[in-house]
Amino acid sequence: MNQAPATVPGQSKREDGLAHLSAPVLVDTPTAFAAFLQALAAEKRMALDTESDSLYRYFYKVCLIQISTPAADYLLDPLRLTDLKPLGRFLADPAVEKVFHAAENDILLLKRDFGFEFSHVFDTMLAARILGRRGVGLAALLGECFGVALDKRVQLTDWGRRPLTRQQLSYARLDSRYLLPLRDLLAQELQARRRWREAQETFAELPDLSYVEKSFDPDGFWRSKVVRDLRPTELAIFRELYLWRDQQARALDQPPFKVLTDQVLGQLSQEQPARLGDLPLNARLADRFGPALLQVIARGRAAAAPPPPARRYNGDGRPDPAVSARYDRLRAWRGQRAEARGVDPDIVLTNETLMAIARACPDSSEALAALGVVGAWKLEEYGPDLLRIVSEPPH
């Protein structure tokens, strides 16, 4: 860049423990964004991370995009920048490597909010998991590899508020600053342990992730741990409260748990208060929601108990016994392979992949490959075992 990097307002390198790093570049104006794009054009790899306000908004959004190159750290403010489209050509360029930690969520949100497409992705968390590391969170890896400490409390702050604090911006730059050297360390280990092809195959699936909007599930209350302790009549009240809470959360643009937690809904369902003074809420919440809650509780008392949801198997209906038997055998085999390799079972193959194989019951490598659920490396590594297991007669 021709201009000197703009420092984060109020930043103290001494306080942040970043005396060995140059100040990050805050990109929150069209001029700064144009200069950033000019600098990025000279780079062949970048590290990315995002921050959103999902802990504070029902309709959450990306609030900050951190991009680090070997030369500098950039903090892009999408709440101040009106057009981020030019960034998309770098993200989609296969000649530019994009390094994430736990890429899935970042890629999905960037696709949703800005329509970006991706290619040539490296995921340091997936790399660490393929290597069988136990501490695969970014804070654990940075502490182990570089002696860098992340204050994860800052991650829980409201990234949608402006101005961002010095602590937020200092934390944000660290989330991307060390991803490139971390990538190099993990890549060397992957190659040394002959897991590079496996990792490359896994990374290649990430750009194809598609964001699917999840609509509100009126039966989602069954997934709450609280319902285990409720009687049928109390479940009817809990369901009504659950539906009411979502309406309030939408209207207030707050996450549902910020309106009332599941624990409070459970307590209301059990105690069934009929007067404002009996509500187990503080004065602020009682004044705000009390009359509506009493109406909802009364409605729940008059409602029939909700029937439990139909049992489902792997999210795709309950299969016939032969499919279930193949699936169980595949899971047992996967557990053994995962233990032998020192990785989590889903690194070998996911439940969804095992179910697809159990249902299709392929009888050849070609048929297994045609399912499109395993790549070339996994087909070579696991294919013979998979074909043998699905062909076994039921015991």
Image: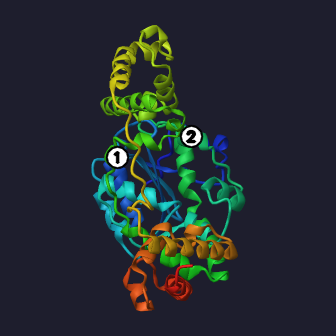
Q: Viewer-proximal residue, 20 or 112?
A: 112
Residue depicted at 42% across the width and 9% down the height: 275
Asked whether residue 360 appears in the rendered view, the answer is yes
Vertical order, 1 against 173 (above or below)? below
Q: Viewer-proximal residue, 214 or 269?
A: 269
Query: Is 322 on the left-hand or right-hand side of 17?
Result: left
Vertical order, 320 against 385 (above or below)? above
Vertical order, 88 against 275 (above or below)? below
Asked whether residue 2 appears in the rendered view, the answer is no
Q: Could you tell me which secondary element the residue under label 1 belongs to?
A: loop
Across and down, in percent, residue 240 comes to 36, 30
Vertical order, 222 against 138 (above or below)? above
Residue 154 is labelled as 2
Three-letter code, disc 2: Val
Query: Is 215 on the left-hand or right-hand side of 7?
Result: left
Across and down, in percent, residue 85 comes to 28, 58
The N terminus - image quarter: bottom left
Residue depicted at 62% across the width and 77% down the height: 190
Mark 2 closeness class: few <14, some 14–19, many ≥20 residues within 10 Å? some
Across and down, in percent, residue 207 comes to 39, 69
Query: Is 100 on the left-hand or right-hand side of 184?
Result: left
Q: How is the image coloured?
A: rainbow
Of callouts 1 and 2, the N-terminal one: 1
Residue 194 is labelled as none
Three-letter code, disc 1: Thr
Across and down, in percent, residue 2 comes to 42, 59
Measured Cα–Cα span from mark 1 to mark 2: 24 Å
Residue depicted at 55% across the width and 68% down the height: 346
Q: Viewer-proximal residue, 85 or 269?
A: 269
- Residue named by callout 1: 29
Q: Could you tell me which secondary element the residue under label 2 belongs to?
A: helix
